[in-house]
Image: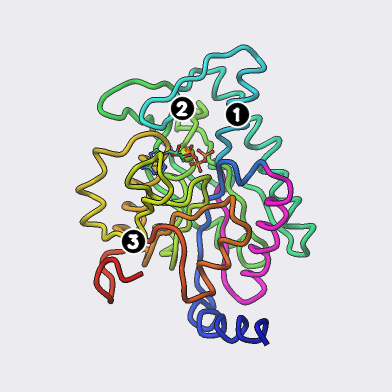
Amino acid sequence: MRDVATLLEALPYIRRFHGETIVIKYGGAAMIDLELRREFARDVVLLKYVGMNPIVVHGGGPEITSYMERLGMDVEFVDGLRVSNAETVEVAKMVLLGKQNADIVLGLNRQGQPAIGLCGDDGGLFKIRRHMPGGRDIGFVGEIESVDIGVLLHVAEDYIPVIASVGADASGQSHNVNADAAAAAVAAALNAHKAIFLTDVPGWLEDPADPATLIRRATTERLSGSLEAVSGGMRPKLESCLRAVQGGVAAAHILDGRKPHSLLLELFTDAGIGTMIADRFEEPDGAR
Ligand SMILES: Nc1ncnc2c1ncn2[C@@H]1O[C@H](COP(=O)(O)OP(=O)(O)OP(=O)(O)O)[C@@H](O)[C@H]1O
Ligand SMILES: [Mg+2]
């Protein structure tokens, strides 16, 4: 009976989300564990089967770092963004496209739903310019000027698009793009219903060292006021949540990708997990 109850609980959500686009940012430790990778693929395929339009955008942080270290290269981050010289971009591109993107596509295919891998260059998906946070030069790190959704609309008709966050600027120079920012840009351009960021922590934490300080939900207003105090990889992630919601996405979620099926739990159960960001909430803050 418990199984039946679970299905019944999911039904109104399945109805509500039918036909909606859900952009899923996949990254961090959740992408490394083999079992979690398989579960992730199953979850995404299930979303497609129940009539949603899932789009996957992925980063590759830990694995890019491990390849760089194997090659004896220096690894440096500024405010959660990877400082990228020409060699770094080359390695990032190889790891992202040659390995991670291909593996995610294969994983989805094996669960019975064909997927297609893309990067910012495919079908002119991303228009990219140099990103200089606070005027600082951190190398070939790009920001997305615009997203041409044409290719996504075509691909998503029949396949699950899987997007690697790398692409060239107008001169043909490849740039590393933070995958959270890429997911936000894609979600806003597609007018997605949700942007979901899977990561390796329970969500946005008041104190990064204490998982018990999870912020369950925050309005965009509260988030804007708190951004300055956030550092590390959570900074671009929260900025991306803000950008997505300000760009018209109904809600952004940060979920623990280490927890099996966190995607399904968030979408199809009443409880909700992780951090939810929206313009406003129907119930008062803290009720979730
Ligand atoms: N306030 C905070 N709450 C939660 N995590 C935080 C906070 N401040 C910093 N962090 C760090 O942010 C990290 C998540 O961002 P990170 O960029 O490392 O991973 P990701 O974005 O999921 O993966 P990738 O960058 O590979 O796409 C956490 O592991 C944590 O160390
Ligand atoms: Mg990150």
Q: Position of residue 178 (x, y in %)?
A: 46, 38
In the rendered view, would you say 194 is above or below 33? Answer: below
Mark number displayed over residue 156: none
Is the residue marked by circle 2 packed among few (<14), some (14-19), or many (20+) residues within 10 Å?
many
In which quarter of the view is residue 219 placed?
A: bottom left
Of circles 1 and 3, the one toward us is 3
| Label 1 to label 3: alpha-carbon separation | 31 Å
Asked if the magenta segment contains residue 75, the reply would be: no
Q: Say if mark 2 contacts mark 1, CB within 8 Å.
A: yes
In the rendered view, would you say 44 is above or below 123? Answer: below
Magenta stretch secondary structure, dominant: helix
In the rendered view, would you say 60 is above or below 17? Answer: above
| Label 2 to label 3: alpha-carbon separation | 28 Å
Residue type indicated by callout 3: Arg
Q: Position of residue 11 (x, y in %)?
A: 56, 84
Q: Secondary structure at mark 2?
A: strand
Mark number displayed over residue 64: 1
Q: Secondary structure at mark 3?
A: strand
Residue that carries the numbered disc 3 in the rendered image:
217
Residue 144 visible, this angle: no
Residue that carries the numbered disc 2 in the rendered image:
82
x 73%, y 46%: residue: 34
Pointer 1 or 3: first along the chain: 1
- Left or right: 95, with 276 as reference point: right
Q: Secondary structure at mark 1?
A: helix
Q: Which residues are magenta?
A: 33-58
Pointer 2 or 3: first along the chain: 2
Residue type indicated by callout 1: Ile
User: Disc 1 beta carbon < 8 A from ligand 1?
Assistant: yes
